Image (spheres, rainbow, N blue to C red):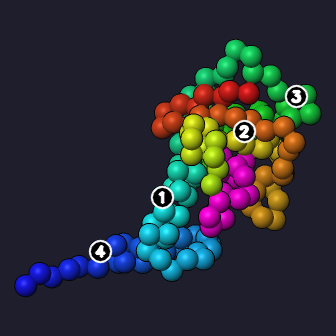
Amino acid sequence: MKKTIPFQKDFAGILEQRMTAAGIQIKSDKPDDIIIQYITLVKRIIPPKPRKILIAKDFTCPPELQEGWEMFRSKVESGEDINPHQSKTMKREGYTDLMLSSWQIHHFHLGVTIQSSGYIERTGDILYAMVKDEISLLLK
């Protein structure tokens, strides 16, 4: 007699608990959807840790964002949490950041004030970067 273990459902239940505890809204009760949502979210969240920065030769920062750029750079180098500089949609169920999914390129806002949402103030111009375990490559 063959026994089956509901691994997928149990695994999805564990992931659902983790996301709920982190304040992330889950709109689907299907195990496949929950697992995909969790994996997508994990790709977006950048673990805080010190990183070296490599800057593209043609990188420039508009003068009005200089203070935000210096704050962001300091956070990256010292290992502070830079997730508040990302898109507010990063925790939204079903949202797919195509640039991140396709090219592993994050985008960051260079504001200086944390808003009530927990995210840094939005800026028109944004910073594009590839963030790896030990290094951040700033593109534009």
Labels 2 and 1: the sequence-earlier one: 1
Q: Amino acid at mark 2?
A: Phe
- Marks 1 and 4, how far apart at CA: 17 Å
Q: Is 85 contained in the magenta span?
A: yes
Amino acid type assigned to the residue bearing label 4 in the image: Phe
Determine whether the residue tagged by mark 3 lies in a helix, strand or loop.
Answer: loop
Q: Residue furthest bottom?
A: 1
Magenta span has 48?
no
Split into 4 quadrants, where in the image is the N terminus?
Answer: bottom left
- Residue neighbourhood size for the residue with mark 3, other residues' Cα within 10 Å, grouped as few (<14), some (14–19), many (≥20): few
Number of other residues with Cα within 10 Å of mark 1, as a class: few under 14, some 14 to 19, many 20 or more: few
The reply to whether the C-beta atoms of the residues labelled 2 and 1 are less than 8 Å apart is no
Relative to 57, is 51 above or below?
below
* Relative depth, front residue between 49 and 56: 56
> Is the residue under label 4 in contact with that under label 1 (CB below 8 Å)?
no
* SS under mark 2: helix
Residue at the spot of label 3? 62
Q: Label 3 amino acid?
A: Pro
| Tag 1 residue | 39
Indicate which label's residue lies in the foreground, 4 or 3: 4
Q: Which residues are magenta?
A: 82-95
* Residue at the outermost right position: 64
Q: Which residue sits at x=70%, y=14%?
A: 57
Q: Tell me the element at label 1.
A: helix
